[in-house]
């Protein structure tokens, strides 16, 4: 049986490191880092996620500024709030929870966030910095994936890595991060020809396609590392809902290591969000010092 990569434990370790960094900043006389979270509307899943972020902020000592707006909020009102948060020295990170109501242009809103406060790593400026290897704030979930990979393979240079999924949020950025550590990277998707054959050549598989149990056991060669990004709700034979990933978890126990769902990638996303917020605060302090 392959090693189970415990995302919860690794996220706790990262939170402890982040808290130590916050304590050191405050001890040095710096302002306590602050994270502003914007939630427009009353989407239940988004509400739960925002609550988790607020609680995690408290655990590491990051100030949390909640901005809960009604679904009727206009695009101009939302952009005005972002402009105020961009100018607020107490705010080091801004996160606008998506999806947004249909009358609001999500792309326009995310691009309005100051790239130096874009702790989700979604701004085109940060995406471009990742592409060119010139710094910037990394996207949270891909950063978490890389930390999970490092926990079982600290030197991935030369490995064949397959990313199944081509989204701007996960697939594309994690492919660039894998490339930056020396992997030979293939990006595939649900329409890729002979995807099982492509997968069987991979030493590392990152599944982020959004289809329940899409990656089968026969696709995974013995000794491969499997990172499952998917979070899908399905009904079991007993009629009850349960969470499953994009990988048929019970079929890939011959892998060297695999992330479970839940408890794998998910906890890392919030931990990396707070890590990014503190790094943004440190970068701001350095700019002021210079």
Image (cartoon, helix red, strand yellow):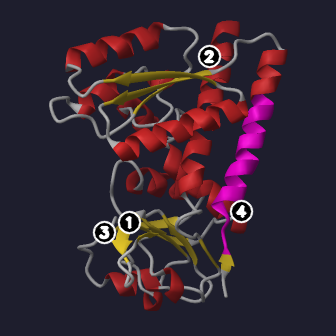
Q: Is residue 153 in sight in this rendering?
A: no
Residue at numbered disc 4: 151
Name the residue at 51% across, 57% down.
Answer: 179
**Residues at circles 1 and 3 in contact by the CB criterion of under 8 Å:** no
Which badge, 4 or 3, is on the more N-terminal residue?
Answer: 4
Which badge, 2 or 4, is on the more N-terminal residue?
Answer: 4
Q: CA distance from mark 1 to mark 2?
A: 38 Å
Q: CA distance from mark 2 to mark 4?
A: 30 Å
Q: CA distance from mark 1 to mark 4?
A: 25 Å
Which badge, 1 or 2, is on the more N-terminal residue?
Answer: 1
Dividing the picture into quarters, in which one does residue 58 lie?
A: top right
Residue at numbered disc 1: 232
User: What secondary structure characterizes most of the magenta part?
Assistant: helix
Residue at numbered disc 2: 284
Magenta residues, start to end: 4-21
Which badge, 2 or 3, is on the more N-terminal residue?
Answer: 3
| Label ID, residue 189 | 3
| Left or right of 230, for residue 9 | right
């Amino acid at each position: 049986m392959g090693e189970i990569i415990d995302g919860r434990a690794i996220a706790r370790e990262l939170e402890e490191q982040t808290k130590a960094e916050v304590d050191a900043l405050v001890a040095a006389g710096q302002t306590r880092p602050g994270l502003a979270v914007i939630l427009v509307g009353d989407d239940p899943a988004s509400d739960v996620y925002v609550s988790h972020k607020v609680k995690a902020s408290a655990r590491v000592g990051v100030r949390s500024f909640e901005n809960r707006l009604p679904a009727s909020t206009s695009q101009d009102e939302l952009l005005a709030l972002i402009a105020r948060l961009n100018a607020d020295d107490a705010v080091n990170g801004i996160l606008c929870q998506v999806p947004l109501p249909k009358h609001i242009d999500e792309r326009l809103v995310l691009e309005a966030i100051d790239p130096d406060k874009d702790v989700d790593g979604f701004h085109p400026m940060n995406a471009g910095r990742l592409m060119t290897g010139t710094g910037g704030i990394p996207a949270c979930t891909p950063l978490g994936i890389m930390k999970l990979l490092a926990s079982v393979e600290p030197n991935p240079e030369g490995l064949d890595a397959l990313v199944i999924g081509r989204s701007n949020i996960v697939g594309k950025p994690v492919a660039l991060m894998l490339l930056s550590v020396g992997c030979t990277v293939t990006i595939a998707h649900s329409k890729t020809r002979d995807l099982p054959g492509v997968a069987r050549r991979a030493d590392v598989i990152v599944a982020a396609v959004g289809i329940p149990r899409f990656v089968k056991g026969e696709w995974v060669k013995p000794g491969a590392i499997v990172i499952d990004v998917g979070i899908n709700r399905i009904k079991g034979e007993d009629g009850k809902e349960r969470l499953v990933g994009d990988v048929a978890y019970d079929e890939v126990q011959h892998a060297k290591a695999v992330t479970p769902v839940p408890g794998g990638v998910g906890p890392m996303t919030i931990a990396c969000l707070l890590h990014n917020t503190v790094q943004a605060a440190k970068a701001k302090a350095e700019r002021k010092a210079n």
